[in-house]
Image (spheres, rainbow, N blue to C red):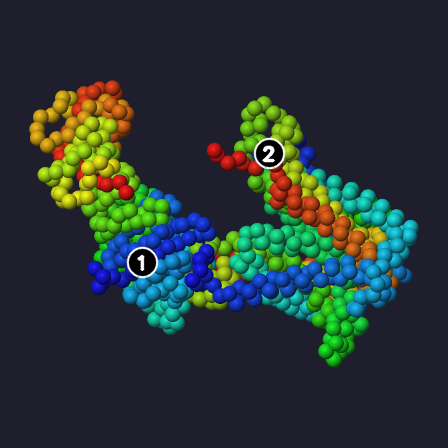
Amino acid sequence: MTNDALVTFEGVVKRFGSFVAVQRMDFEIAKGEFLAIMGSSGCGKTTTLRMLAGLEAPSEGVIRLAGKPINDLPTWSRDTPMVWQSLALFPFLNVIENVEFALKMRGVGKAERRRRAEQWLERMQITEFAGRNISQLSGGQRQRVALARSLVVEPEILLLDEPLSALDAALKVRMQSVLKNLQRETGITFVYVTHSQSEAFSMADRVVIMSRGKIEQIGTPQEIYRTPRTRFVADFLGSSNIFTGKVAAAEGGIVTLNTPAGALSLASPDPSAHAVVGQTASLTVLDTKTNLALRSPSGRDLNAIPVRMIGEEFIGATATVYLETRDGQEIRIQKSHEELANLPLQIGQEFEAYWSYDDGHLVMEH
Amino acid sequence: MRKTLSLYGLTFSLPLLIWQLLFFVFPLVFLVALSFWTVKNFRMQVDFDSVNWVTMYGRSVFWKAYGTTFALAAAASVLVSALAFPCSYAISFKLSETARRWAVFLMVIPFFTSYLVRVYSWQIFLSDAGIINVMLGWIGLGPYALLNTVGATMIGYLTLTFPLVVLLQLFSLVFIDRTLIEAAHNLRCGRLRTVFAVIIPSARVGLVIAALFAFILSFGDFVSPIYLGGGDPTTLSILITDTTKSGQQWPRAAVIALTMIGTLLVVAFAAVRFAYKGRTK
Amino acid sequence: MSDKDTASINRNRAVDGALKLYIVLGYAFVFAPIAASFVFSFNSDRFPSIPLGQFSLEWYQAVASDPLVWQGLRNTLFVGVTVGVLATALGFGAAYTDYRYRFFGKQVYLALALLPPTIPVIILGLAMLAYLSRINLSGNALSVIITHVVICAPFAMAIIRLRLSQMDPDLEAAAWNLGASEWAAMRHVIVPFAMPAILGALFITMAVSFDEFAIAWFVSGLNETLPVKVLGFLQGQVSPRINAIGTFVFVTSMTLVILAQLLLTGRGEKNRPAADE
């Protein structure tokens, strides 16, 4: 990975007064990848992006772009065009003038400027709006202008700061595919900051999850989804049931935890997975892999706990059933309507929730 | 929101309307009528005669004063805009929130404190034995005649307009979306270039309106040209006072005043057109 | 490398320093005449210049012993207070009209309410003098008051309108909904809410009236009507007495303007929103 790293963060820290926005960040962005940085507001994701663009200076550490440190490089001396959440289109310039702006700043001649800007307008399918004012465009059209404005210089990297957050749901999905295709076709490295899991997971090759200025996990969407590395990530994704307890045993590839809901086991593919008896750990299991039955299921290598139903919710083809364990923890399962058809879904009904050892995943507390 | 005005509504709406009709609109309308009156034996007579217009517009003194006044006001407007801009720019972008509030607070005070006295005080600096000449004397220069010059008139105009222009520029500059500046930097636009490529176009309406106000105030001002400029060259405002003093020629003064109002209207209209040019199509 | 709180890579210290120095110079230019008037009003020399002479109160004594000045002061205060009250009342009415009503010709109404200060004083003076003498109102305090209200009401209107625009538009309707008549809602909701702006407008209009006129009253003590006539007196004269009067004028207007600003910026306002616990 090191060889084709376009950007490296080495021990980067960012403080605002006494507030630490980013703490000791080390990671790389590979050439040509679509990287999403995700987290809730105030987690430091936008600050990270702004440091890369030179809009904030790191308090400590080094940021390298193509191997060269860029800490002290003013914004206008780096080629890190960005798409703002507000888009930041110049209202006093029309569409094509906005797109030409960066070329003009580079001293590209008028005719050449126009030609290249028109190419991008065409590519973004907004040629007909070339002479319009920004205020006359729809949200989606503005989005395309902002992309064209940043991409017209054909940079190696494009920074995007929650660019879709102002759009309605349908347009958002359409713009996601526009962005993904654009990235694939141009091969430009995209760094995409978002708080939306669906945006990050549907577009990105790799996802960085941040919390309180720290990186919690970096990986492909599948990796993160299936094997959240920390309890925070599992919680943040919100798609797993989490049981926390102490490690009671760890042998033969099976780890057992004593949790308030009972003794629960899981198959640990990596026996040395630093599970030490007596330590606090969590078992996570995806809500889609958690099953429901009226009576205790028979079968080997299954966890089963008694639960009581407290609510349900239907969204499209799937249903979510909310349940409570004996010790009062809320869990949920997600199934299709067919899978739930034979169960008497009534509030207060007692069930057994069960899942296979293989579907459990171990998260050690730090 | 109600569409019709009730007795309750009229109680609040009417007083100002009546007052401004009686004491603002009518006097100005009366000025128009007055410009057609005639003066015989130092007494004004109700009349409808274009003689005042013909006489005034036929005099080179009038046109010379008109040219002078227009040129001085235009120069003052450009000069004060250029001098005030770095100040309002620095207040908007280089000061903390608290310091900016103080700056506005301090700038509002002179706007409302006696212009006449402030102009008077400039004499202390500018007179032949005044502070500036004494200080120049220390390094072996001068004394120079600073008072009763066009330069002194300009200082008076600056005194009159600088606080207002700074405030108006400031209000358009602080509302510029800061991400536009970041976006410009991000697209390889350097510091100084950003001022001309992004900040000035963004604040255009405010900057033009500020310059317009500087023009209006300087164009009509009579304190600085008389008191600091020594009445030479003659401006329209001086011409008005001279005309009223000499033989009750109020109708002719009315001609000058109406010409001034007409000029201001045209300039204001042109400035507003320019300010909003290209904003909406 | 020390902690960088802002994007200091995009800043240049020398440029920032120069710009801040420029701010100081700008304010020095604006306040120089005010400061000079203040300093030389306490200077014993007949002719104001440097080096300074002795500290002296003789010009204040000379001014204070002039009965015409006292009469002028009384007249000025009378005019200022009357103008302030009238202009604020008219301005409030206009601001409320703009805030609440939509009607045909509103643009014209607003133009009438806001335009007068943009007309040069000399032209307004000429028109007023000619018009008021025609309807037998010229030459007394009343004519001064009338003229000043025309100039001052727009300031009051602008200040109060700004405050009303900060008011939740549902507040008045809520009062009606709770059984208040229009008049009761005005008295118990609108006026209390706009009170800081009403007082601010009162002070500002008093200051404007005071400035337009104070000198005329002080130096003549007569029923001088417009600043045009002031010039006749001032022209060619450099008297430290004027510095003494000028300082008094500055101190008074500044006090009024500062009071108004304190009211309008809500400093010292008690009911700030409490933090959620």
Is residue C277 in view from this perspective? Answer: yes
- Looking at the rendered image, the disc whose residue lies closer to the viewer, 1 or 2, is 1
Count of marks overlaid on the render:
2
- What residue sits right under mark 1 in the picture? A9
Which chain letter goes with mark 2?
Answer: B
Hey, which residue is sitting farthest left in the picture?
Answer: A299
Query: Vertical placement of A78 versus C211: above or below?
Result: below
Q: Position of residue B239 (x, y in %)?
A: 78, 65
* x and y percentages locating residue B277 in the rendered image: 51, 59
Chain letter of the residue carrying label 1: A
Residue at image point 77% right, 58% down = C38
Q: Quadrant of residue B38?
A: bottom right
Give above or below for A67 relative to A171.
below
* Alpha-carbon span between mark 1 and mark 2: 66 Å
Q: Kindly indicate the quadrant of the structure image that contains residue C124.
A: bottom right
**Label 1, residues with CA under 10 Å away: few <14, some 14-19, many ≥20:** many
Residue A136 versus residue A72: which sits nearer the camera? A72
The residue lying at 26 percent from left, 40 percent from top is: A365
Label 1 with label 2: CB-CB less than 8 Å = no
Identify the residue at horizontal 38%, vertical 70% (top origin): A106
Mark 1 secondary-structure assignment? strand
Horizontal and vertical percent position of residue A141: 35, 52
Q: Quadrant of residue C215?
A: bottom right
Q: Which residue has dot 2 on it?
A: B4
